[in-house]
Image (cartoon, grey):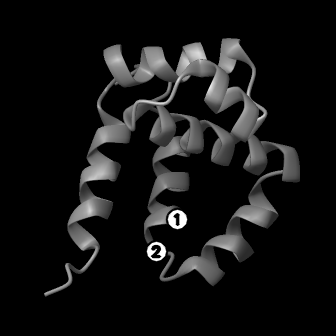
């Protein structure tokens, strides 16, 4: 964890996020906290990470998401050398999807 990031203010923000109960509450909160461009950038990085994990090429990802190769490269670096946050979320989401019998 980045020591510069770990502050009381960031802790409070994350505690606030953890109180959100559904997607509508997320929209309400994040639209107040972030600009439209900040939210779109966050969601773009998340989509890039999903596509990288599924084996898509940089060209495919850039065409689909509009992300620059620099953004794709930064997300790829996080996937390979980061704190495994993306993988943790991907795993939890996969586990929460009901399987068909």
Q: Secondary structure at mark 1?
A: helix
Q: How far across and down, in percent of the image, does residue 41 sit?
A: 73, 40
Instruction: Residue 19: give its label.
Output: 2
Instruction: Residue 16: give its label.
Output: 1
Residue 55 vs residue 27, the one in the foreground: 55
- The number of numbered discs placed on residues in the rendered structure image is 2
- Evaluate if marks 2 and 1 touch, with contact meaning CB atoms under 8 Å apart: yes
Instruction: Indicate whether 67 appears above or below 43.
Output: above
Marks 2 and 1 sit apart, C-alpha to C-alpha, by 5 Å
Q: Which residue is located at x 80 percent, y 65 percent? A: 32
Q: Which residue is located at x 49 percent, y 30 percent? A: 56
Please state if 45 lies on the left or on the right of 87 as rendered.
Answer: right
Q: How far across and down, in percent of the image, does residue 53 sit?
A: 38, 34
**Please, which residue is most extreme toward the bottom here?**
101
Q: Which residue is located at x 57 percent, y 13 percent? A: 73
Residue 87 vs residue 34, the one in the foreground: 87
Q: Which residue is located at x 43 percent, y 21 percent? A: 78
Instruction: Residue 79: give its label.
Output: none
Quadrant in which the N terminus is drawn: top left
**Please, which residue is most extreme toward the right here?**
36
Please state if 17 lies on the left or on the right of 18 as rendered.
Answer: right
Q: How far across and down, in percent of the image, does residue 87 sit?
A: 30, 40
Q: Secondary structure at mark 2?
A: loop
Number of residues whose C-alpha sits closer than 10 Å to that of mark 2, classed few (under 14), some (14–19) or many (20 or more): few
Instruction: Indicate whether 49 appears above or below 11.
Output: above
Instruction: Indicate whether 18 appears above or below 85.
Output: below
Residue 48 vs residue 54, the one in the foreground: 54
Please state if 65 lies on the left or on the right of 60 as rendered.
Answer: right
Residue 8 visible in the picture: no
């Amino acid at each position: 964890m980045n020591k510069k990031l770990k502050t009381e203010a960031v802790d409070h923000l994350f505690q606030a996020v953890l109180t959100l109960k559904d997607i509508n509450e997320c929209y309400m909160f994040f639209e107040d906290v972030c600009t439209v461009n900040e939210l779109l950038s966050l969601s773009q990085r998340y989509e890039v990470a999903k596509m990288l994990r599924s084996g898509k090429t940089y060209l495919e990802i850039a065409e689909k998401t509009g992300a620059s190769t620099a953004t794709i490269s930064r997300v790829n670096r996080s996937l390979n050398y980061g704190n495994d946050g993306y993988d943790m979320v991907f795993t939890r989401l996969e586990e929460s999807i009901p399987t068909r019998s």
